[in-house]
């Protein structure tokens, strides 16, 4: 492994070697290295294969912006090797090449060229025949693609901590401008958060020899109380909310003021084979040397259009590279940098640029020539042996976040790029993102932005005017030459890329223009230029230049495309995933587990579906007794002088005339008269009602009840007791006997009638007993404090064991209630079902004095026969239809559906509920059910299959 | 969509803490015609501008309150419990 001598401000710690593997082979680096810097130091130059042509690709930016070094790491694809730090034992694997990175058979698509090259080939070729698309897709996906998602779930799991942070000022970017802005704002008393995508603060300043200054600025920022998040890219602007991703934490930062100091992105140049490994941004090459002490090459040709390239050339020369500079500007900027280049003995070719890179799978030579305004070589030029072509095609401000936040960009010829103009209130730009390129100007602009942000918060900064004056007096930015759309020696060999991510060439954009895709937005969609992982950072300007040259428009008219969030690559797992609601378990859940229950989700609840024997459990309930945990029922206490009035207005039936200790069934309806929920209402005393709701519906019912209460301003209060009160249903012919043994209460049929409620102690625990029967047997719903629920459950199970009582689960309960045609709201009703359609005409009291929710709609409904009705059915042939199967109308058209169907062990037949056309809703009517190819005959019934007169229930 | 909302009981929270209750509308005082009923149930003004609307502090005190919000900018002008809401367009 070769390294340069210690570099000032280098990030590596040479005392800490780190070993990892690349494609299974051992590799090594130091703590502080990135994957690319370590591999580069070990001599590797090819880091990926391109998306479409599988051309070898080397490093481009060195700072996590390009897509040239994406790796698969421990199951996660698309990791940026030039910013991802190495760790001991890390397993790094290449992507998109087979069998290996250095020999990829799919390279044939590039070498053969021909049919695979033109843009739009895939669109045009694979559209027909349409039925073959699944086959095409499979082949194409494995041919072109970036990484592979692991199939094993444990490799895909991702845990993210979400943190909400509100602050006065969020500074995005931790270079000189950002640090200065954050410090200034914090010193003025603002609560400031600063984030930077790099693991080390300082931005360009730290790489360009200013690490001492960076340390100073960072120290001042920390002293001023700035919260600094490093290794933390801001992902985008979402209505003022900025998600900042930092490892396993997603900070959701909401600030009053935003300072965007995101810097600028050095641009590549376009020439033949400008993607050969060894063609690198000059800033990337310099970064390898400065931050990681890696010598980026031995002999370099630096092609530049601005002063930054000259500065980088000096830095590369200083670390021992043999450098030749080709500056497109006829006077090389005319500044002191050109003088320093010459003084260093570096060959400087003015008005020249690189027109072609040559070499087999890596740069071996550069062809440099003088070019005209359109980039065509004047003369043959000269060929230079080299292993590095370092390019600086100007700087493009990193404007995406500013644009997402509402800024506007206009073209400014003097910087050969776009600059942001109209910033909305609360948004400030600083540093290179605001068009400043000299270190001092960058820092001063940051301080001004920080002061302005503080001023907008009502602080009174001093010296802002002075600072502005100082900024104005600093030397203007050095002149920049506008690079041609393509520098060319006229030769036909080689590909000139405008977008390395997506393998889009100059020829592709030209062809797309000829085919009519002559605006950037259309071209983008057709050629996919700018749509790759680097989001157009390096391809937007080059693509716009080609389009401008082809259409004759100026660059300002061609414009920019919108880079949407996320601005930085972020794993899907950080943003999305199954929202993990806390599972709810009833107070007796432990008992279900001890009994070996099949536990399943029922909404948010974990419920006992059965205890291994659903048939035996349902038989036991009907033969002796059973107990089911119904703690999931919603339970609301409605209290106050107007409680009765409130319920009368909420339910279609009457509740205020309910006698104390009596219970009434009720459904709630929407204003449109549709069933929304059901449950029981029990009057405890004059001003107190105990309301139960469906398990899933309680939140909605409570919201709706409290909203109406607020709207009407009635004197009542609603308390949700669901979690604090457990409930279990004891049912079966032996239920009374079991209960009597556990309480002093007179449980006789005369003293404790059907639909009575009683307060009593069961096994010493104060309980409320509701005599109701969802499963159709003599039954008691026992409500008790959750803390005592296990005790009550145990007492009942123990007392019942002598008579054959068995705990039963949800599945047997569903069979038993179906025998009674008891409806489950949400299962047997949908959002269009009215009480009339559900066969509950009796529940709607249109003669009631009060208005109630849904009254007017129900008056209309009552006047018309519903199109479908919910009825029971049996299948004489014994087939069990699937729930959701279609019920056919008299003309054979689908008109209803099966909502519930079960085989009843007791009745020995298939029973169910279905919505059927009104004409077929009478007892004995024959209907046809169409169920995935089966046609099943069924007979309608409107009476319960079991105990139709309710004698058992009342017994 | 992302903005802050101030619960009159609990203070300022992210909007994700709250449930949206729709624009404030008026329930007909007496039996509406079929057309009025249809409008009441199914039609909303869907204003591009300031509207009065209901919010529910779902992940907090569970109170319902009123707010005026500009639907174009999500700028919230005020929030208040129904009893304290400024006069103007009366809620239901």
Image (cartoon, helix red, strand yellow):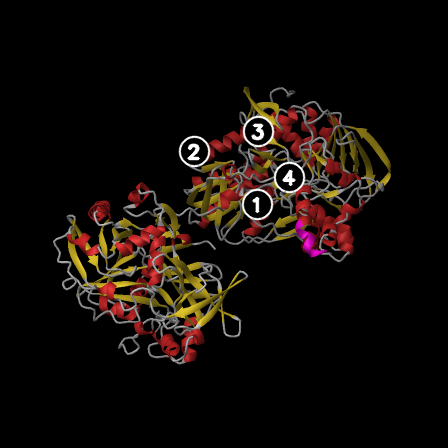
Viewer-side label of 3, 1: 3
Q: Are marks 1 and 4 in contact (CB under 8 Å)?
A: no
Q: Chain of mark 4?
A: A
- Real-space Cα separation, disc 2 to disc 1, in angstroms: 30 Å
Q: Quarter holding the N terminus of chain A?
A: top right
From the image, tell me which residue sits under label 2.
A223
For the residue carrying disc 3, how many other residues have a C-alpha within 10 Å: few (<14), some (14-19), or many (20+)?
A: many
Residue at 33%, 60% in the rendered image = A817
For the residue carrying disc 1, how many other residues have a C-alpha within 10 Å: few (<14), some (14-19), or many (20+)?
A: many
Q: Quarter holding the C terminus of chain A?
A: bottom left
Is residue A381 rendered to the left or right of residue A452? right
Q: Which of the two discs, 3 and 1, labels the residue nearer the N terminus?
A: 3
Viewer-side label of 2, 4: 4
From the image, tell me which residue sits under label 3.
A91
- Point out residue A863 in the picture as x, y percentages from the top left corner: 38, 80
Q: Chain of mark 3?
A: A
Foreground pick, A850 / A441: A850
Q: Which residues are magenta?
A: A128-134
From the image, tell me which residue sits under label 1.
A567
Q: Which of the two discs, 2 and 1, labels the residue nearer the N terminus?
A: 2
Tell if the residue under mark 3 belongs to the same chain as the one under mark 1.
yes
* Element at label 3: strand
Q: Are marks 3 and 2 in contact (CB under 8 Å)?
A: no
Tell if the residue under mark 2 belongs to the same chain as the one under mark 1.
yes
Residue A837 is labelled as none
Q: Chain of mark 2?
A: A
Relative to A168, say whether A638 is above or below. Answer: below
């Amino acid at each position: 492994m070769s390294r340069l001598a210690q570099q000032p401000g280098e990030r590596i710690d040479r005392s800490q070697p780190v070993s990892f593997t690349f494609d299974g082979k051992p590799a090594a680096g130091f703590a502080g290295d990135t994957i690319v810097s370590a591999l580069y130091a070990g001599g590797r130059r090819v880091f990926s294969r391109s998306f479409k042509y599988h051309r070898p690709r080397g490093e481009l930016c060195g700072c996590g912006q390009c897509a040239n070094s994406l790796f698969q790491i421990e199951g996660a694809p698309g990791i940026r090797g030039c910013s991802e730090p190495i760790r001991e034992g890390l397993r790094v694997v290449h992507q998109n090449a087979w069998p290996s990175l250095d020999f990829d058979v799919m390279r044939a698509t590039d070498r053969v060229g021909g049919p695979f090259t033109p843009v739009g080939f895939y669109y045009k070729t694979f559209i027909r025949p349409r039925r073959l698309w699944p086959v095409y897709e499979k082949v194409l996906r494995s041919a072109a693609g970036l990484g592979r998602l692991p199939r094993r779930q444990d490799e895909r799991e991702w845990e993210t901590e979400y943190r909400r942070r509100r602050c006065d000022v969020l500074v995005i970017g931790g270079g000189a401008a950002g640090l200065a802005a954050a410090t200034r704002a914090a010193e003025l008393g603002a609560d400031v958060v600063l984030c930077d995508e790099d693991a080390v603060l300082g931005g360009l300043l730290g790489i360009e020899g200013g690490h001492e200054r960076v340390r100073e600025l960072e120290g001042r920022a920390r002293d001023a109380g700035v919260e600094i998040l490093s290794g933390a890219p801001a992902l985008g602007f979402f209505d003022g909310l900025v998600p900042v991703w930092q490892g396993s934490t997603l900070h959701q930062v909401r600030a009053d003021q935003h300072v965007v100091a995101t810097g600028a992105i050095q641009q590549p140049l376009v020439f033949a084979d400008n993607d050969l490994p060894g063609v690198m941004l000059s800033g990337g090459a310099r970064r390898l040397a400065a931050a990681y002490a890696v010598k980026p090459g031995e002999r370099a040709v630096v092609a530049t259009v601005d002063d930054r390239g000259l500065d980088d050339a000096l830095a590369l020369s200083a670390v021992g590279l043999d450098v030749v500079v080709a500056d497109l500007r006829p006077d090389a900027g005319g500044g002191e940098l050109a003088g320093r280049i010459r003084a260093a003995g570096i060959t400087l070719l003015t008005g020249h640029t690189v027109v072609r890179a040559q070499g087999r799978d890596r740069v071996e030579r550069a062809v440099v020539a003088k070019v005209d305004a359109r980039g065509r070589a004047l003369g043959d030029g000269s060929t230079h042996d080299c292993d590095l072509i370092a390019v600086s095609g100007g700087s493009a401000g990193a404007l995406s976040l500013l644009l997402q936040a509402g800024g506007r960009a206009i073209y400014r010829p003097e910087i050969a790029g776009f600059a942001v103009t109209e910033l909305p209130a609360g948004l400030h730009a600083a540093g290179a993102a605001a068009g400043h390129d000299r270190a001092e100007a960058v820092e001063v602009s940051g301080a001004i932005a920080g002061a302005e942000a503080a001023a907008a918060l009502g602080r009174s900064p001093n010296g802002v005017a002075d600072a502005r004056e100082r900024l104005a007096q600093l030397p203007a930015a050095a002149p920049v030459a506008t690079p041609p759309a393509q520098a060319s020696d006229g030769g036909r060999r080689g590909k000139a890329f405008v977008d390395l991510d997506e393998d889009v060439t100059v020829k592709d954009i030209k062809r797309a223009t000829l085919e009519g895709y002559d605006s950037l937005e259309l071209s983008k969609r057709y050629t996919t230029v700018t749509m790759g992982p680097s989001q157009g950072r390096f391809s937007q300007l080059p693509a716009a230049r080609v389009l401008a040259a082809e259409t004759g428009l100026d660059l300002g008219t061609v414009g920019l495309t919108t880079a949407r969030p996320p601005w930085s690559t972020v794993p899907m797992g950080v943003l999305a995933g199954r929202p993990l609601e806390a599972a709810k378990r009833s107070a007796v859940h432990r008992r279900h587990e001890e009994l070996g229950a099949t536990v399943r989700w029922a909404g948010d609840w974990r419920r006992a579906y059965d205890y291994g024997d659903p048939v035996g459990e349902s038989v036991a309930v009907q033969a002796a007794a059973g107990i089911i945990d119904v703690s999931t029922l919603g339970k609301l206490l409605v209290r106050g002088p107007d409680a009765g009035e409130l319920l009368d207005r909420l339910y279609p039936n009457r509740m205020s005339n309910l006698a104390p200790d009596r219970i009434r069934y009720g459904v709630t309806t929407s204003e449109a008269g549709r069933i929304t929920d059901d449950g029981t209402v029990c009057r405890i005393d004059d001003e107190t009602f105990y309301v139960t709701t469906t398990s899933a519906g309680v939140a909605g019912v409570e919201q709706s009840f409290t909203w109406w209460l607020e709207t009407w301003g009635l004197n009542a209060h609603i308390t949700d007791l669901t979690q604090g009160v457990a409930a279990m249903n004891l049912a079966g012919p032996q239920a009374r006997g079991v209960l009597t043994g556990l309480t002093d209460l007179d449980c006789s049929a005369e003293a404790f009638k059907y639909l009575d409620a009683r307060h009593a102690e069961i096994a010493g625990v104060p309980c409320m007993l509701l005599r109701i029967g969802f499963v159709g047997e003599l039954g008691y719903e026992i409500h008790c404090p959750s803390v005592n629920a296990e005790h009550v459950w145990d007492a009942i199970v123990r007392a019942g064991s002598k008579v054959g009582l068995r705990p039963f689960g949800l599945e047997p309960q569903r069979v038993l209630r179906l025998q009674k045609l008891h409806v489950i709201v949400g299962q047997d009703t949908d959002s269009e079902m009215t009480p009339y359609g559900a066969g509950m005409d009796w529940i709607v009291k249109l003669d009631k004095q009060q208005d109630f929710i849904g009254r007017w709609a129900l008056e209309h409904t009552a006047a018309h026969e519903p199109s479908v009705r919910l009825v029971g059915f049996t299948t004489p042939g014994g087939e069990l239809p699937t729930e959701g199967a279609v019920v056919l109308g008299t003309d054979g058209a689908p008109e209803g559906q099966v909502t519930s169907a079960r085989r009843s062990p007791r009745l020995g037949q298939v029973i169910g509920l279905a919505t059927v056309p009104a004409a077929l809703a009478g007892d004995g009517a024959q209907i046809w059910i169409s169920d995935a190819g089966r046609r099943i005959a069924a007979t309608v019934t409107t009476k319960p299959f079991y105990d139709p007169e309710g004698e058992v229930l009342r017994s | 969509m992302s903005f802050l909302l101030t619960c009159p009981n609990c203070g300022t929270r992210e909007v994700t803490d709250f449930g949206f209750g729709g624009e404030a509308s008026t329930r007909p005082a007496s039996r509406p015609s079929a057309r009025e009923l249809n409008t009441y149930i199914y039609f909303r003004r869907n204003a591009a501008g300031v509207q009065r609307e209901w919010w529910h502090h779902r992940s907090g005190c569970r109170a319902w309150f009123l707010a005026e919000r500009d639907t174009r900018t999500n700028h919230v002008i005020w929030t208040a419990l129904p009893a304290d809401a400024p006069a103007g367009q009366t809620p239901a």
